[in-house]
Every structure is written in C-alpha cells, then in structure tokens.
Image (cartoon, helix red, strand yellow):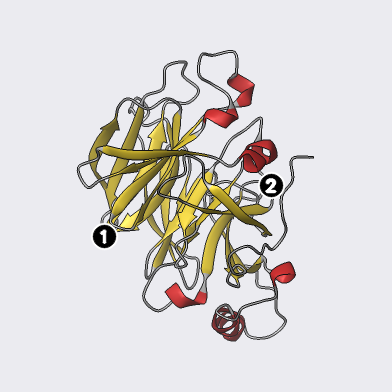
Amino acid sequence: MRLRSSGSPAAFVTTALAMACCAAPPDRVMAEEIARFPAAEAHQGVTVDAAHFYAIANREIGKYDKRTGRRLTGWRERGDGPIAHLNGGVVVDGQLFCGHSDYPADTPTNTIEIWDTRTMRHVERRRLEGQPGYCNWVDRHDRAWWVLFAQYDERSNEPGAGTANTQLVKYDDRWRAQATWRLPPQVVHRVAPKSCSGGSFGNDGLLYLTGHDARELYVTEVGRSRPTLRLRATVPMAARGQGIAWDRSPRRAAERILYGLDRASREVLVMRSAPVASRGAAARRLTST
C-alpha cells in the first residue's frame, strides 16, 4: 500500500477519512487519492463492503482486507467456463452482484453473476434479455437495480451501436425493466469512442459515472420525466476511469469514500470527495467543444 503521508499510515488514513465529509468550494471539488493497494485483479471494476474490497478482472475476483490491503481469497473461472468479461459490481446483503457480458461478441449476451462474499463461491446467474449493448456495471439504489448497457462508437458499423445509444436501465426486484435513460450528450462526447465503464450512486442520490480511462467523474441526476440523465458536474479524480464504488458501510457512508482503479499499475485506489455543489453549480462544466 502507498499512502500520501510521511507519518503513520494508519493515522493518516484515519485523518483523511475523517476530513472527507467536509464540503469544498465548487471549483475545488475533486476525488483525491488517500491510499492505494496492489491488486492483481484490478482491471475492470471494484466494489466494497464493511470490511473488504473486491477487485474484479475479466474472469477472476480478489477479496482483500480493506484496512491492510492483504489478499484473503478469491475466485477464478475455470478454463472452459462461461464467464468471459466481468465488469462493475456491488455488494448487497452478503452477496456480490457483478455485471457480465460476452464482449466483444457481435450479439451480446448479458448476465448478472452473483457470489457469496463469505466463501467467494459463485451461487447464481441472472440472464438479462431484451437490452442492446454490453452490461458494464450493476448497482443497487432506491430499492431497485440499475444496469448500464454500453454501446461504442468504435463498433458503430453495427446496427444500433454508437456511444450515444448507451442505456441505463432500472429494474425491479424481479429483474423486470422499469425505465431507461441515455447518457448526457456532453458525457458521450467525453467518453467516445469508448463508453461508460463505471457507475455508483452516492449518498446524495446522484449517479457518478466514469469513462474508460479519463481521470474524471461525471456527476448526473436521474429524472423521472427525462429520457436523458442530467449532467450536474464533472469532478477530477485520481483513478483512471473503469469501475468505481462508493463505500456505503455504516461507519463510512457519511465520509464520501470512493474506490476506483489504476488499471495500468494494477492497484485499487481509495479516494475521498467533498459533496458536489448545490443544484445549478458545478465543479467544472463540461462542454462539447
């Protein structure tokens, strides 16, 4: 683990986490690094619970002690197994839910793969039918499931493809689609020719999105009557795109601790971010120029 401090690592992390709940002026909001941990699986996504974080690669997951970064156990797909391209996930009631697709297959097959976090045993698979694109992440918010199906400009020769056709889908508890939203056009411009690689709802009710490799968080609102997410702000962050996860554990939820990846170095990053400015303001407005 590398910490940005010359003093005691434990004392530094405790202090940094305690500071995270303090608001910053709109033009100073950012998700800054407070710690990082080596994780061989830090390739596609990361999620977190009260005591652990889980680094997610295409066909394997590592379970790590959240305080020390020590790898405890993990899961790996067998050579001929069906899991090909895991992405972002979320831990709910002792189970790890992870978005999965067969990207880059021409005809996407999307599933939600589920593990018991205590044993890291794969326990269930949910097939998601009827949605174009590739399942890039799943989250749980407001008593519903939220799944992002990515499309890519780099595959725009295929019918219905193109980053602008990426869709966020809300599901009920029986995995029935309830509503869909498109990405804000400013975000499409920013992430193309790739797409939205990560997403996680904050305790402020806003949806934080990432692209493929930019050091940016796109802060959006989900409107009941709008077919497109509303962009509130973009926030510089230490992580290089890919999957993200807010730490929602009871002791950390108010501290606004965000987990992300540095894919190049295969490390999980721990970041803190002050609350985003009030409605109508922005840390930094995105433009399409």
What whole-number distance in Å separates the C-alpha atoms at marks 1 and 2? 31 Å
Q: Residue at x 63, y 38 (%)?
A: 185
Q: In which quadrant will I find the C terminus? A: top right
Task: Of the two numbered discs 1 and 2 on the same chain, state the one appearing first in sequence.
Answer: 1
1 and 2 marks in contact (CB < 8 Å): no
Tag 2's secondary structure? Answer: loop
Furthest toward the front, the residue is 225
Q: Nearer the viewer, residue 62 or 34?
A: 34
Residue receiving disc 2: 214
Q: Nearer the viewer, residue 288 or 134?
A: 288
Q: Nearer the viewer, residue 126 or 280?
A: 280
Residue receiving disc 1: 94
Q: How many marks?
A: 2
Give coordinates of residue 56: x percent, y percent.
Answer: 46, 47
Image: 151 above or below 235: above
> Is residue 9 at all visible to an observer of this figure?
yes
Q: Foreground mark, 1 or 2?
A: 2
Specify the amino acid type for callout 2: Ala
Specify the amino acid type for callout 1: Gly
Give coordinates of residue 216: x percent, y percent.
Answer: 66, 53
